Amino acid sequence: MKRAVRVFLYSLAGLACLAGAAFAYLSLRKPDVAPPPAIRIEPTPERLARGKYIAMLADCAGCHSPHDMTRFGLPVLEGQLLAGFQFKPENGVPGYVTAPNLTPDPETGIGAWTDGEKIRAIREGIDKDGNTLFPMMPYTRFRNLSDEDVYALVAYLNSVPPVKSAHPKTQLNFPVGLMVKFTPKPVTAPVPPPDRSNHVAYGKYLAAAGGCQDCHGENLAAANVFPFPPLKVIAANISPDRQTGIGKWTEKDFLDKFASYRDYVAGGPPKAGPDSFTVMPWLNFAQLPDDDLRALYAYLRTLPPVKKAIETHPGFPDRKKT
Ligand code: HEC
Ligand code: HEC
């Protein structure tokens, strides 16, 4: 063997060893896990109402339920609220990702979890058995929810009707599973409630809970694509750019846009054709109080305008903007 080739082969073997060592290290290392808080959540009427509101804002049901894909706004299938849903590679996720059944059913839901385990999963990304949750579950944002809002969420989850519905476990493509192991971080200090008198700060809190930037991008104009073959939609530019974003919208335009879906929430029938298919949680957000929509508007206006024309439904040139 020529020396150069031999050196090359040795270095390849060396690399393989290194990769092997890194692999072994990553597989053996445990995620950052704190014990679940020892707490039982008292389901007061205030908590149940607030929990329902946060669940609507954060659209827990959007991921954690099967939907009627033929109707605008993708309402949850009858009797399947929070019964779980599996995302497939064709939906743009790295493998088969199950947003599990969150109902109190003890076998197929989370009825056998303690309240502390639920709290830890929601804001620290660790399941009952100590495993890391894939961060498509927005725990990195939910850690900013106030303690009281997380307790309210748990009180609400405990109150929804149990549904028996089993799903396969999440299977991530290699090496995504290894890479996400270190995303979870314990919450170590109390999180106070947001200051509602500061409109911008409150809007920021609501935007984080509502996931605006998960879908629209940190800069509000990332053009993220949501494929549900044969349908797909692209997140609109909602930055304050006057030409390509929503910079020309007055506060009233913004409120009216959401209000325009209120009748539909009350039972309207429109079908979702490919030109109106959307994952934007209009049905949920139409129910937000005007004051919360005002706060969201105020916060969105504080971000820099981004010039980027985005076609939300490419291939439908005649379609007016939503
Ligand atoms: C963008 C999609 C998405 C949203 C929105 C979402 N989740 Fe999740 N959630 C997931 C996925 C995916 C998993 C599973 C991750 C995995 O298997 O690694 C998960 C896991 C969980 C778990 C752990 C369940 C188990 O059996 O392991 C809990 C509890 C949970 N979510 C609660 C919530 C709550 C409460 C909300 C709303 C406040 C919410 N989720 C919003 C996607 C989502
Ligand atoms: C699950 C993904 C998702 C989340 C979460 C989400 N959006 Fe959207 N949004 C979209 C998509 C996709 C569109 C484009 C299609 C449409 O208009 O429905 C859109 C459209 C919009 C529009 C209409 C823009 C226009 O030019 O017509 C506004 C306004 C908007 N979103 C605001 C928000 C706000 C505020 C939040 C957070 C409270 C939010 N969105 C959260 C996906 C999302």
Image: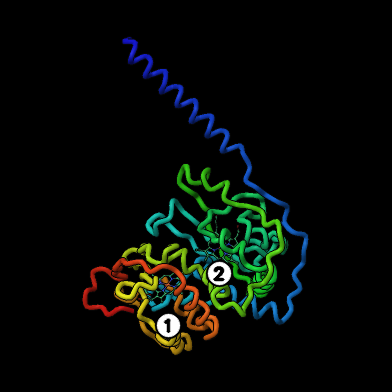
The three-letter code of the residue at mark 2 reads: Ala
Q: Give the residue displayed 47% in from the left and 85% down from the top.
A: 265
Q: Determine which quarter of the picture holds residue 268.
A: bottom left
Instruction: Work out whether 252 lies above or below 206.
Output: below
Element assignment for label 1: helix
Any mark on residue 254, and which? Answer: 1
Q: Determine which quarter of the picture holds residue 202.
A: bottom right
Does the beta carbon at disc 2 come under 8 Å from ligand 1? yes
Q: Determine which quarter of the picture holds residue 269.
A: bottom left
Q: Give the residue displayed 54% in from the left and 29% down from the top.
A: 21
Using the image as rendered, state which of residue 92 and residue 149 is in the foreground. Answer: 149
Any mark on residue 159, and which? Answer: none
Badge 1 crowding class, 10 Å Cα cut-off, few under 14, some 14 to 19, many 20 or more, is: some
Using the image as rendered, state which of residue 115 and residue 208 is in the foreground. Answer: 208
Element assignment for label 2: helix
Q: Which residue is mark 2?
A: 209
In the drawing, does residue 66 fall left or right of residue 227? right
Instruction: Work out whether 262 lies above or below 144.
Output: below
Q: Earlier in the sequence, mark 1 or mark 2?
A: 2
Does the beta carbon at disc 1 come under 8 Å from ligand 2? yes
Where residue 205 appears, as percent x and y from the top left, is 57, 71
